[in-house]
Image (spheres, helix red, strand yellow):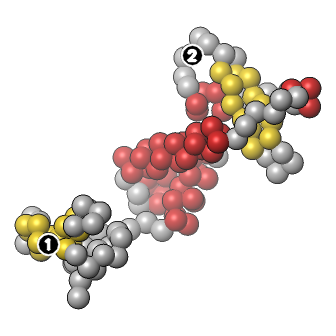
C-alpha cells in the first residue's frame, strides 16, 4: 500500500511520469505530488540551522555553498523562510502598555537585514531570555 509522503493518506492517483521514467503520484486529500523512488538529498533541520547560524555570523552565501554543499538559491530560500517565521512570531506578541519599562537598545545589523534603504522609522520586538523589548529602528 502506498501512502502520501506529506499527509499519510492512502487515497492516491497516478499523475504521469517524471523525466527519469519514475511513476509520479498525486494525493487526493492534500493535492501534493511525489515519486516513490525520489533519491534527491533532503537536508536535515540540523544542517539548515547550521547554515542559518553561519549566515548570521557573517559568512558569505557562496562560502556557505562551498562548505556545506547546499546551493545558494536554497540558502536564500531558507533565509526568507526563517525571516517569515520571525515576522509571524513578532506580530503575535503584544506591545506592553507601560512603555517606561523598555530599555534603549542599539542594533546595527538588524536594520539592514529587515529592510534596506528605508526612510521611515520602523518598530519591532526583540525576544530575549529576560523578556520582550521594543525596538525603534531609525
User: Dividing the picture into quarters, in which one does residue 46 lie?
Assistant: bottom right
Point out residue 41 in the picture as x, y percentages from the top left corner.
Answer: 34, 69
State the residue position of label 2: 118
Point out residue 127 in the picture as x, y percentages from the top left corner.
Answer: 75, 44
- Residue 60 seen by the camera: no
Between tags 1 and 2, which lies in front? 1
User: Dividing the picture into quarters, in which one does residue 83 lie?
Assistant: top right
The residue shown at (86%, 48%) is 130
Give above or below for 2 relative to 97. Answer: below
Residue 13: which numbered mark, if any? Answer: 1
Residue at disc 2, secondary structure: loop
The residue shown at (41%, 57%) is 70
Give above or below for 10 relative to 92. Answer: below
Front-most of 105 and 26? 26
Alpha carbon separation for disc pair 1 and 2: 49 Å
What is the crowding at mark 2: few (fewer than 14 residues within 10 Å), some, or many (at least 20)?
A: few
- Residue 16 seen by the camera: yes
Point out residue 51 in the picture as x, y percentages from the top left corner.
Answer: 53, 55
Are the residues tagged 1 and 2 within 8 Å (C-beta)?
Answer: no
Give above or below for 63 relative to 114. Answer: below
User: Dividing the picture into quarters, in which one does residue 108 lie?
Assistant: top right
Amino acid at each position: 500500500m502506498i501512502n502520501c509522503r506529506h499527509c499519510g493518506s492512502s487515497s492516491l492517483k497516478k499523475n504521469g511520469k517524471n523525466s527519469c521514467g519514475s511513476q509520479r503520484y498525486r494525493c487526493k486529500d492534500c493535492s501534493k505530488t511525489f515519486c516513490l523512488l525520489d533519491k534527491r538529498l533532503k537536508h536535515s533541520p540540523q544542517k539548515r540551522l547550521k547554515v542559518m547560524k553561519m549566515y548570521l555570523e557573517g559568512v558569505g552565501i557562496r562560502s556557505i555553498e562551498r562548505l556545506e554543499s547546499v546551493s545558494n538559491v536554497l540558502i536564500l530560500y531558507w533565509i526568507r523562510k526563517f525571516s517569515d517565521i520571525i515576522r509571524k512570531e513578532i506580530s503575535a506578541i503584544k506591545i506592553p502598555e507601560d512603555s517606561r519599562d523598555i530599555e534603549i537598545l542599539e542594533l546595527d545589523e538588524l536594520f539592514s537585514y529587515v529592510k534596506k534603504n528605508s526612510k521611515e522609522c520602523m518598530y519591532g520586538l526583540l525576544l530575549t531570555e529576560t523578556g520582550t523589548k521594543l525596538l525603534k529602528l531609525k
